[in-house]
Amino acid sequence: MVTSEPTTAPSAMPSTRLPERAAVIDLDAIRHNVAVIRKVAEPARVMAVVKADGYGHGAVPVARAALAAGASWLGVAHISEALALRAAGIDAPILAWLHTPDSNFSAAVAAGIDLGCSGWELEAIVAAAREQERPARVHLKIDTGLGRNGVTADRWEAVVGEAVDYQDEGLLRVAGVFSHLAVADEPERPETDAQLDAFREAVALAEDAGCDLDVRHIANSPAIFSRPDAHFDLVRAGISIYGLSPFADQTSADLRLRPAMTLRATLSQAKRVPAEQGVSYGLTYRTASAGALGLVPLGYADGVPRTSDRGPVRIAGRTYPVAGRVAMDQIVVDLGASADPAELAGAEAVLFGSGADGGPTADDWARATGTINYEIVTRISQRVPRVYVGEGA
């Protein structure tokens, strides 16, 4: 368990009235989490991964908060995501690593974006470097066992040799070697040891071939906390900078992290209903007794998982399970027999947040849906306005 950083209270909600639906993003929590990660990873530097619009939190505000807190790099999947950061005026080092033959390598080289390279992209990257009349910066990726992109071990020497030849021509610079871990969130599994051994061998071969590497990186969020031997020069912090734990048996609080997103809405209606009232499509739920139902204007079009089973919603200090199926635009909660609809009309309904008040978290929704917290926050759609709180909001 990490104990190097004290946990502080989350930033207060803004004093102005929130939109009827909002994902409230606490930028102070982002900064706090980056500070925790820096402490754990030092002397390695921190790359803040802001792909997928900052895991649903907003790539540009998160990137700025992370850099202000001491992150040295930004990481994205696609070149288009990197270009959007540059367009926002962010000039920090950025790595983009997932490409297709149609990726805009010329724009990336022109914008000074580092490019992950699995070998097949070399000719296209070199062509872009010639067009832009400036050398490209590449990080060669070795597939150490995940089986996604990356150079396979049998081709590594050949690809490194080809990259060094281009480097000698002044067309590119091999700035890094990297890989990605498959089971670091299960620290007891032996595959991580095998991947690290393969990574060290790949790095040694690249250095022997003439690569003067700026960074070697393989550690993702779980490896940051569980495998200090994986830190090397740079760690890639994804889910952890958003305050969520990558482990099944450790919470955000265990890691001294603060969840940054609160998904909330204004209750759109509360009404009394009789016993045996059917609720939502399919009438899969019926009230056990006469009572009240509350209508929350968030549904699967907003990213609330339709497959969730009785996901939790916090209203007026109590947590209720969703009653019946999640619809496109709304969910229903059974407020029980004692609820007064007149008192609850217009109340705030929180689906997940920091959990500091005993309310539900993204982990609770992940369990209700049979998925992981990564998916819960990333899937929140753009129909839900993002409201930023904390310094720099």
Image (cartoon, helix red, strand yellow):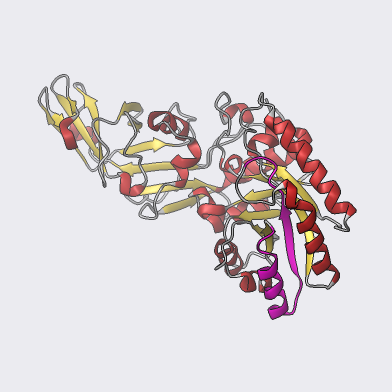
Choose top left, top right, bottom left or bottom right for residue 367: top left
Task: Please indicate, yes or no, whether residue 303 appears anywhere in the rendered image.
Answer: yes
Residue 389 or residue 229, whichever sits in front: 229
Report the side of 114 relative to 232 (left or right). Answer: left
In this rendering, the answer to whether 206 lies above or below 183 is below
Residue reaching furthest left? 274
Residue 115 or residue 161, whichever sits in front: 161
Look at the image and say whether residue 156 sits in the magenta stretch.
Answer: no
Residue 136: x and y in percent read 73, 69
Can you say which quadrant of the picture contains the N terminus? top right
Residue 16: x and y in percent read 40, 51
Report the side of 272 relative to 2 (left or right). Answer: left
Residue 54: x and y in percent read 54, 51
What residue appears at the point 57 percent right and 23 percent down from the top-left corner? 249
Report the side of 280 relative to 219 (left or right). Answer: left
What residue appears at the point 68 percent right and 38 percent down from the top-left corner? 36
Residue 14 or residue 360, whichever sits in front: 360
Look at the image and say whether residue 143 sits in the magenta stretch.
Answer: yes
Residue reaching furthest top? 288
Residue reaching furthest front? 154
Which residues are the magenta region?
Answer: 119-146
Choose top left, top right, bottom left or bottom right for residue 368: top left
Task: Please indicate, yes or no, whether residue 43 appears anywhere in the rendered image.
Answer: no
Residue 343: x and y in percent read 22, 33
In this rendering, the answer to whether 292 lies above or below 379 is above
What residue appears at the point 78 percent right and 44 percent down from the top-left corner? 44
Q: In the rendered picture of this protein, how many numbered marks are placed on residues?
A: 0
